[in-house]
Image: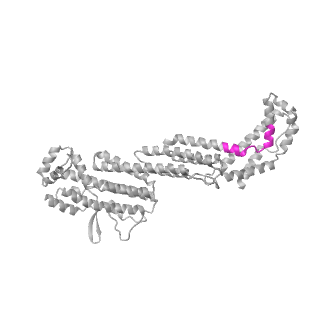
Amino acid sequence: KNYMDYLSRLYEREIKDFFEVAKIKMTGTTKEGKKFATLPRKESAVKQETESLHGSSGKLTGSTSSLNKLSVQSSGNRRSQSSSLLDMGNMSASDLDVADRTKFDKIFEQVLSELEPLCLAEQDFISKFFKLQQHQSISGTTNEAEEMDGGNLSRSYTSGAPQTISSEKDMIRQMMTKIFRCIEPELNNLIALGDKIDSFNSLYMLVKMSHHVWTAQNVDPASFLSTTLGNVLVTVKRNFGKCISNQMKQMDEVKISKKSKVGILSFVAEFEEFAALAESIFKNAERRGDLDKAYIKLIRAVFVSVEKVANESQKTPRDVVMMENFHHIFATLSRLKISCLEAEKKEAKQKYTDHLQSYVIYSLGQPLEKLNHFFEGVEARVAQGIREEEVSYQLAFNKQELRKVIKEYPGKEVKKGLDNLYKKVDKHLCEEENLLQVVWHSMQDEFIRQYKHFEGLIARCYPGSGITMEFTIQDILDYCSSIAQSH
């Protein structure tokens, strides 16, 4: 009991100092004169305490020498310190001159990596020192504890326990819990700080904590370390869930300007940022079930919110909002290759394609309106039963009327109409998605399709008349190219 009380006080002080340094590093703030704490194992102090209890120091080296030590001269005193934490304490600003999230990840990993061997070393020492080997029985442990020097220490602890201890593992875990009672709340405080700094930090914490829990459980699923890290992992998962929920809430609450074009919606860009970050963090993770579930929730919310904004948009046509944003989503999913979102990638591509075509047809309309109206009349007569080659005998659709309509669309006027169309499209589209030339090329193709349709009707309904349009397909290609280059 004396041993545990002593170490509990010692570790609590040192661990709190250690976590204080981690917090300072995470926030990037320091206090003048503040010395960077590490987790020193005060070997001489522990030895003196235990020697006074047991009269022997030969069996105590396991408690301290198993830790990685580096003796450092500080203020004239020699202090035993863990080298990895020393590195952290002495890390300069330039060493941490990287993205804040990467810095957080490195610090959080360092905290876990330092606590893990510390707990394992202390557990190993307790197990060996108090003869609490896992293969021994409860009675055997008690007898050996009574025979050894300081046997009263074990008996005083067990007799004072509020409930019967069923196994050596239970005893070790309870002793470890008492000695390291401050670790779990300190870890939870650190996690809360990381989440406050940046909610996306929950991604790093989820991967790191899951890995350390997985490692600890492979060694001993019932150990103090496994239990403690498992409890903290629950908190990390809860924070991760809040991060996802907050993103979905922000999508639902998004407001768009009525005076400017919509462009790529903020939550679409944020999903891209989240997914890219998540994929880099989970690249080598053992498990990604939590992330995949989050992806499905987020992407469905993104799809719904894009449609909602598109329906509410006043400045930008609905088809443009849908086309640009689903193109961006498709490009993001294609680049990141997220297997659980393969169906959503195909859906995004289909939505982009459908709304591109819809916008092109709607915006282009009928550039040769009178000619289009004329041929609609021709097709109506054919539908009524008049043979195609006999349509020209109809007074309203004879060759003279056709030539009159065609003359209204000289090449110069066609080019002027296309130039105005290009300007209108340019006003609708955003620069960041760079779809102007894609849309313009599609409009060119649609115009040529209409042109060929008219040519076909002329060939069938006015055979041998020699009537042709006043501009050719090559002219259309030249007009479109010239217009695109001039803007």
Q: Relative to 299, is 354 on the left or the right?
A: right
* 362 falls in the magenta region: yes
How many marks can you see? 0
Q: Is residue 97 above or below residue 224?
A: below
The stretch in magenta equals: 358-375
* 210 falls in the magenta region: no
103 vs 10, nearest the viewer: 10
Residue 463 percent across, percent down from the top left: 84, 33
Q: Relative to 6, is 366 on the left or the right?
A: right
Residue 264 appears anywhere in the view: yes
The C terminus: image quadrant: bottom right
Of all residues, the one furthest to the top in this rendering is: 385
Which residue is pictured at 75% across the width and 49% down the height? 418
Residue 271 percent across, percent down from the top left: 52, 50
- The rendered magenta stretch, by its main secondary structure, is classed as helix
Identify the colour scheme used. one colour
Give the quadrant of residue 446.
top right
Of all residues, the one furthest to the left in this rendering is: 147
The N terminus: image quadrant: bottom left
Which residue is pictured at 33% across the width and 55% down the height? 185
Residue 73 percent across, percent down from the top left: 29, 69
Q: Relative to 123, is 284 on the left or the right?
A: right
Residue 167 percent across, percent down from the top left: 21, 44
Residue 282 appears anywhere in the view: no
Which residue is pictured at 88% across the width and 38% down the height? 400
185 vs 389, nearest the viewer: 185
